[in-house]
Amino acid sequence: MGLLKRTATIAKDADYHQEIINAAGEIYNYLSGKGEVPISKVKKDVKLPETFVDMGLGWLSREDKLEYTKKIRAISVKLR
């Protein structure tokens, strides 16, 4: 892989990394005023592509910021 192509890939990865961080921030702010919310509602209400909502939730989970509750038909999430 040439240096230019590798540099472009690194820049693209950094952009995705920042987008995931931004998504996590939006989700955190959304949940801070909501309490416990089904994940499907988070995906509907937060105006981001579903993939970034998933990655943002994963980011927050990794940071131990979320608590999940399994309901009969859904999984709900809230801030710790």
Image: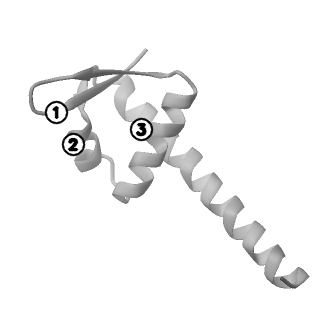
For the C terminus, give its image quadrant: top left
Viewer-closest of 41 and 55: 55
- Up the image or down, 32 lies above or below 56; here it is above
Looking at the image, which residue sits at the far front?
1
Rounded to the nearest angstrom, the CA distance separating label 2 from label 3 is 13 Å
In the image, taking residue 52 as reference, residue 15 lies left or right, namely: right
Mark nearest the camera among 1 and 3 is 1
Q: Residue at x 57, y 55 (%)?
A: 19
Residue 78: give x, y in percent of width and height. 34, 22
The answer to whether mark 2 and mark 1 are in CB contact below 8 A is yes
Residue 34: give x, y in percent of width and height. 28, 25
Residue 41: give x, y in percent of width and height. 21, 40
In the image, taking residue 57 as reference, residue 19 lies left or right, namely: right
Residue at numbered disc 2: 40
Residue 27 is marked as 3
Rounded to the nearest angstrom, the CA distance separating label 2 from label 1 is 8 Å
| Label 1, residues with CA under 10 Å away: few <14, some 14-19, many ≥20 | few
For the N terminus, give its image quadrant: bottom right
| Label 3, residues with CA under 10 Å away: few <14, some 14-19, many ≥20 | many
Q: Residue at x 68, y 69 (%)?
A: 12
Amino acid type, mark 1: Ala
SS state under label 2: helix
